[in-house]
Image: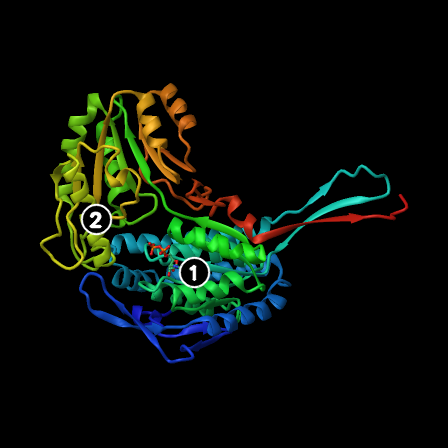
Amino acid sequence: MLASSDAFRREANLIGGQWVGADSGAVIEVTNPATGEKIGTVPNAGRAETARAIDAAQKAFESFRKTSVLERSKMLRRLHDAIMDNQEALARLLSTEQGKSLAEARGEVAFSAGYVLWFAEQARRIYGEVVPSPWADRRILVTREPVGVIAAITPWNFPSSMLARKLGPALAAGCTAVVKPASQTPYSGLAWGVMAEEAGIPAGVINIVTGSAAEIGAELTSNPIVKKITFTGSTEVGKKLMAAAAGTVKKVSMELGGNAPFIVFDDADLDRAIAGAMIAKYRNSGQTCVCTNRFIVQAGIHDRFVERLAEESNRLKVGNGLEEGTQQGPLIDMKAVETVESFVADAVAKGGRVVAGGRRHALGGTFFEPTVIAGANTQMRFAREEIFGPLSPVFKVDSEEEAVALANDTEYGLACYFYTQDLGRAFRVMEGLKYGLIGVNEGLITTVEAPFGGLKESGIGKEGGHQGIDDYLDAKYVCLGGLGL
Ligand code: ADP
């Protein structure tokens, strides 16, 4: 067992089982968003290091692909145990570089372990098929094999669990990986390398490079050895990666942006809707792709909902994530603060009413007040753009049809939520919403057993669920002829 979070704070990249610096010796500084203090550095690697990591992954793949599913399942179980044995240290490291509250960080680490365990179990269910043959003397097999080397690029908002969703299925399938964590939160990504060593995962199966996104991304998307790119991040970058991956026809899985609506109908249970609203909006200080971007509230319940949401938002305890009891940490950086501020200014200029918060928090730095804006309309920027911060715009609507039309009026289609106690309405609305994830009377729905993934410009592919391993496998049709039957 590795006790302290410092044991995981690796200031090096992992390539072919070796912890190494960038060729140039250049580094990137990592800071704690709650204090602005420097935590340490990581290598500022580029194309050459990435190409070597890809070669190492390819070399490891030659033997890793031949391991049995039982061996891989056991490796993943050990990885799960290594994560949970070090949950507290990993959570502290995560909170220090990312800012989220310790309670949320502990939850994220447990969630990572949960994905690893799920895929340890799924490894043993990579079934092929024997298909009834139209020929008397031939037989048809469909086998499923690992795609090969995969590249994973992950964001700073869930620096641990976004990798779990990618490394879990990759290893279960028999693939090897090159990982690029976000530069703001590299330590929780590099910690996967430490954990892999603890779990006895062979050298070269997981390689981790930090540094220039453009350079590392260019190598990962153009190198023909890489067979699949899995990305979680903005739609803008996702589109670029898809275009770049087209050059060598790689498989792609994309978990991109969202613009989640949260609809409250007149017949909703108000207490339940408020509890769901708080978690769906303010988790990770509003910095998740499934966070509510637009509250859409029917006229009959609107005023009561706004009043309660403002009360609860004012009550949130804002502070350093490492302090027990903190519910809202800082935003990731000053750019994020300026973005949220600009959304508030834009809404106010177009007639929005600030009913809670609205400003930078008295704590200074990158802390922002949990904010509620009533009187939202479709001219305001957040009607189209992802907020990624603790700002709750409330749109007022009259009818069910209007609510659903407004909810769907976006190019995104990741998560949505709605509250009603009418069963018929629940089915009508569910069937009318063009979203990949739907919470009915629930504000927090992600779980390892269910497929997570967006529709429209929110992405391609699913993570978790039994579907989550499909993109890491190639199906092969084998026709066995001349059997003389
Ligand atoms: P966010 O807004 O969450 O930072 P991004 O899409 O900008 O979302 O970043 C998500 C991940 O993608 C990060 O690891 C980032 O470094 C990486 N990234 C950003 N631009 C590129 C690029 N051009 N090529 C490859 N990766 C990139």
Left or right: residue 60 compared with residue 206: right
Report which residue position mark 2 lands on: 340
Relative image position of residue 314 (x, y in whole percent):
12, 42
Residue at the spot x=17%, y=64% of the render? Answer: 35
Label 2: element kind: helix
Q: Nearer the viewer, mark 2 or mark 1?
A: 2
Please identify the quarter of the rendering in which residue 14 is found: bottom left
Name the kind of residue labelled 1 in the image: Asp
In front: 348, or 283?
348
Residue 174 location, quadrant: bottom right
Answer with the quadrant where ligand 1 appears in the image. bottom left
Would residue 299 appear left or right of 419 to someone viewing this image?
Answer: left
Is residue 123 placed above or below 30 in the rendered structure? above
Disc 2 residue lies near ligand 1 with CB under 8 A: no
Q: Residue at x 49, y 53 (%)?
A: 243
Check whether the beta carbons of the residues at disc 2 and disc 1 lie within 8 A of each other: no
Question: What residue sits right under mark 1 in the picture?
Answer: 81
Residue at the image point whose x is 9% and y is 54% from the top = 362
Q: Nearer the viewer, residue 199 or 456?
A: 456
From the top left corner, tell me how far across and down residue 434 is, in percent: 42, 32
Q: Residues within 10 Å of mark 2 (few under 14, many from 20)?
A: many
Q: Give residue 135's mark.
A: none
Chain-order first, disc 2 or disc 1:
1
| Location of the C terminus (image quadrant) | top right
The three-letter code of the residue at mark 2 reads Val
Name of the residue lying farthest toward the right? 484
Q: Is mark 1 within 8 Å of ligand 1?
A: no
